[in-house]
Amino acid sequence: MNAAPIQSGRPARLLVHGASGRMGQALLRLAAEDPEVEIVAAVSRSVGQRVIDRIPRFSPSELGGVPPFDVAVDFSLPEGFDGVLSGCLQAGRALVSGTTGLDAAQRSAMEAAARRIPILWSSNFSLGVAVLALLVERAAKALPDWDCDIIETHHKNKRDAPSGTALSLGERVLQSGSQPRYASLRSGDVVGEHSVRFTTSGERIELAHQAGNRDIFAKGALRSAKWLIGRAPGLYGMRDLLD
Ligand SMILES: NC(=O)c1ccc[n+]([C@@H]2O[C@H](COP(=O)([O-])OP(=O)(O)OC[C@H]3O[C@@H](n4cnc5c(N)ncnc54)[C@H](OP(=O)(O)O)[C@@H]3O)[C@@H](O)[C@H]2O)c1
């Protein structure tokens, strides 16, 4: 992995956006154990106590008044993304986002913003899925005439379908000339399962990944945040970090 650009020696100051959610909670818990980071602000729609575990809480409308931060880490919902993007632009600070289900206009806005600040967006921050994507790309290139089916399962509360990860895997397949098909299941509390099947007459290859908990994503996002601070403006992905 590339080393992060040298900083001042103090912990990286993080703003967590979507702090009350499943991912936000995992992020706050892991960040509390990491001496290289300090959470300076936690943002979510519902703000009860103004300070919890010495971390000040803010609503999205208060983003303009948060303490100075080096990087925002966003795991919210599409309706929250525009606010954190403009907050980072106004502050001139880096943004790591794992929010999925963004529409075309939001993706364009992210690309435009990346001309001014460093942004790392990924539909999946797990190392295993990053490697799965490389394997899928390789298989798709070798098997352009085979059928490709991407099957994903997530918990019942997940809003977008197909998942952002399934679409990112599908983009790798599309680049190789095949047209992937998608199937989405929403069941129980499944954290995330992705399976990519290449099928032809008489044989099938299946590449699959199962996420057992959300810490794998939160760890990847924390690593990405530290890596992104001090980088030149641009739109980065997990591949840049792993390369
Ligand atoms: N890239 C990855 O590796 C990865 C992994 C897992 C999940 N995800 C994605 O991460 C996102 C969050 O997932 P989750 O399971 O944590 O969802 P969640 O439990 O529903 O949490 C969503 C969070 O976003 C906040 N929020 C909603 N609307 C907002 C707004 N307009 N402005 C500011 N904050 C807002 C919510 O605040 P309130 O609770 O106060 O409403 C909550 O804190 C989803 O898009 C999911 O697909 C990505």
Image: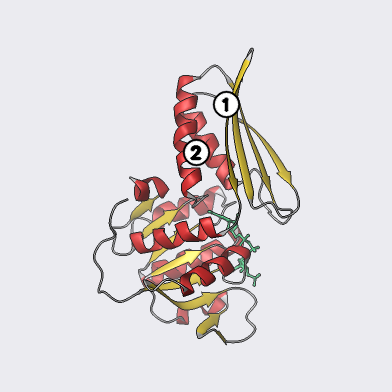
Amino acid identity at mark 1: Gln
Q: Nearer the viewer, residue 51 or 176?
A: 51
**Furthest-top residue in this view:** 201
Horizontal side, residue 80 vs residue 3: left or right = right
| Helix, strand or loop at mark 2 | helix
For disc 1, does the CB lie below 8 Å from ligand 1?
Answer: no
Circle 2 crowding by C-alpha within 10 Å: few under 14, some 14–19, many from 20: some
Circle 1 crowding by C-alpha within 10 Å: few under 14, some 14–19, many from 20: some
User: Does residue 40 appear in this view?
Assistant: yes
User: Which of pointers 2 and 1 indicates the residue nearer the eye?
Assistant: 2
Q: Give coordinates of residue 126: x percent, y percent.
A: 49, 50
Q: Give coordinates of residue 75: x percent, y percent.
A: 55, 62
Task: Name the residue beneath numbered marker 1.
Answer: 179
Q: Give coordinates of residue 223: x percent, y percent.
A: 40, 60
Quarter of the image for residue 89 reads bottom left
Question: Residue at horizontal 72%, vertical 43%?
Answer: 185
**Mark before the other along the chain sequence, 2 or 1:** 2
Horizontal side, residue 69 vs residue 22: left or right = left
For disc 2, does the CB lie below 8 Å from ligand 1?
Answer: no
Question: Residue at horizontal 40%, vertical 57%?
Answer: 119
Q: Give the distance between the C-alpha atoms of the residues marked 2 and 1, in whole angstroms.
A: 18 Å
Horizontal side, residue 5 vs residue 145: left or right = left
Task: Name the residue beneath numbered marker 2.
Answer: 132
Amino acid identity at mark 2: Leu
Q: Nearer the viewer, residue 209 or 74?
A: 209
| Helix, strand or loop at mark 1 | loop
Ligand 1 - quadrant of the structure image: bottom right
Q: Give coordinates of residue 176: x percent, y percent.
A: 46, 26
